[in-house]
Amino acid sequence: MKFNKMKRAIALASVLTMVLPLAACGGDDSGNSSQGGDNQGQQSQSNSGDNSVQQPDDSQGTPEAAWPKDVTLTYYLRGGTSEYEPYLYNDLVGMQKIQEATGITLDYEVICGDSDAIQTQYLAMIQSGTYPDVIQWLHKESYNGGVDQLYNDGVIIELNDLIDNHMPNLKKILEEHPNLAKDMMNDNGQYLYFTKLNPLESTDDLVGICNFGFLMRKDWLENVGLSAPTNIDEWYEVLKAFKTQDPNGNNIDDEIPFDAGAAGLNLFYPAFNILNGIYIDPETGKVGYGPYSENYRDFLTTMNKWYSEGLIGNIWAEEGSFAIADGASTDEHIYGDIAGSWKGLANNWEQRLPGILEKNPNADLVACIWPYSTKDSGVQYTPNTYYSTIDRTTTCISVDCKYPEAAAALIDYMYSEEGGMYLTWGVEGETYTTDENGKHAWTDYGNESIDYYDGNFPRKFTYAMAHISFPRFGQNDVSNTYGDEYANACEIWSKCDVSLIYPGAIAITQDELDAAIGAESDMGDYISEMQMKFITGQEPLTNFDTYLEELKKKGVEEYIKVYQDAYDRYNAR
Ligand SMILES: [Ca+2]
């Protein structure tokens, strides 16, 4: 299924993003005293302080005193494989401040391991019939049918009344941003989850989610006397020059002008007004499927030409295999000074450039803009499906939560401005300062490198980690949390047209797709196989119509219809 490939690409991007602020880890375990007992002691101690949240006060005898003062909620989270993962959340000073402010203690249950292992644990938890109070997870990808099905299966509660009556911050946000309300609710008008909400308004909002795109060797461009390409014709000109003019200067014809690893070719689809999968056709406003379109023929024709002239290498196939590669990875090509451009992340200046400089002291990178459309003049479509008002991680309250109002109050505080700052920047005067214009900056104390379990990283990450998807609103000046080159690249990649992107708020179940085209359909495999053959010339493009016919037989139109129907329901919300 195409689905698998898409999920893989998303998972990879997500892993790369997660790696960004932290050093790689691996090594032996040492002290873990931060978890468990002492934290609770610390929290209940803080309960005696001022509470800035509307915790019901027993002394007033209100019948709505919905939770006891020493309430502890279990908070279930998706961890990773790093050594520090089980302890990180308890240690986050920003989260401790949020607990102090609300008088609610959190008992984290961090599920750690590789993605398969934690997926198994997550499903086992749901199957057990006994749930933590709050469950924060990639529900949409991990549970068939997403949060709607979790609700239908009696795992989580509806949140509409809680938002109305106990969540003034979130209520205000949803009232002021009807687009966010529309995206967060389901087709029945129910709110079933909380998430990181992005109004997509300021540069900061965009920079936070636009951290990948085309990267190119700036020094190579200078060596061939060209500027960074802005459309498909210019891309051809640059790649051809990289191939023929020895830009790495070693007198060997060893350049790979575009390394297509990590699904790199997918970034070229939008220039042909399609995406690699479901998309919205800007011409008709209807749902389409990239590999089943006339524009795909043009995409393949271009890629076939580039391939035949030696301009692309490392073409990514299904499930992470490289169908066309010379045996070396994208990283090896990049560090070996033979890759001229690739799909990269904004952290490549920090993470990859130093490695290239070891090989070539003149090396530098440049972020390329999204190429202008070959169809619509002056439009730069993006393939960035993260370009969404809602985050992929969603946070639900379970039916077993005895004090849902307490959970709502805690999460509502995360949606407040103070809560957002605790989650993004930590503590003012400790990890960050604010200038007279309201701009935030890290302190030396925040940036100081400290030992943390098996690695070390800046102290600020023990206060707040902006990329952890706790519910909150906006990005809180997040661009300043990165270096200039990072922010500049993100800004370049944030300039784009998102019309092709199918709304991330829509959840389609695998059952719906299976019902439409059959669980046994090999449509995705067929598309991958044929793409390779068309690009490499094993299959002439004169057979493209036969390919379309075959896809039709495999149910592609029924597949598209499932998405079209869901899109129609979404538009009717
Ligand atoms: Ca060379």
Image (cartoon, rainbow, N blue to C red):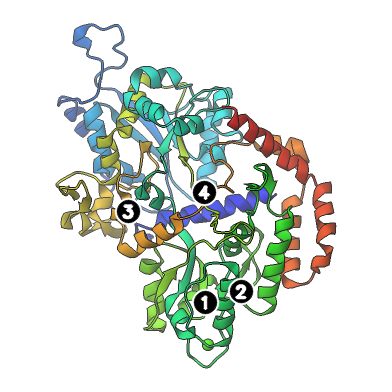
Q: Which residue is mark 2?
A: 313
The CA span between labels 1 and 3 is 28 Å
**Outermost residue to the bottom:** 251
Residue occupying image coordinates x 48% and y 31%: 184
- Front-most of residues 167 and 87: 167
The amino acid type found where label 3 is placed reads Ser
Q: Position of residue 17 (x, y in %)?
A: 43, 55
Q: Nearer the viewer, residue 37 or 50?
A: 50
Mark 4 Cα within 10 Å, few/some/many (few <14, many 20+)?
some
Does residue 568 appear left or right of residue 413 in this picture? right
Residue 496 position in % (x across, y down): 49, 54
Q: Classify 10 Å Cα crowding around label 1: few (below 14), some (14-19), many (20 and above).
A: many
Residue 510 % position (x, y): 66, 38
Cα separation, mark 4 vs mark 2, equals: 29 Å
Give the Cα separation between the discs numbered 3 and 2: 33 Å
Circle 1 sits on which residue? 339
Instruction: Tell me which label, 4 or 2, sits earlier in the chain.
Output: 4
Residue drawn at (69%, 74%) of the image: 305
* Residue 402 can be seen in this image: no
The disc, 1 or 3, on the residue closer to the chain's N-terminal end is 1
* Residue to which mark 4 is pinned: 115
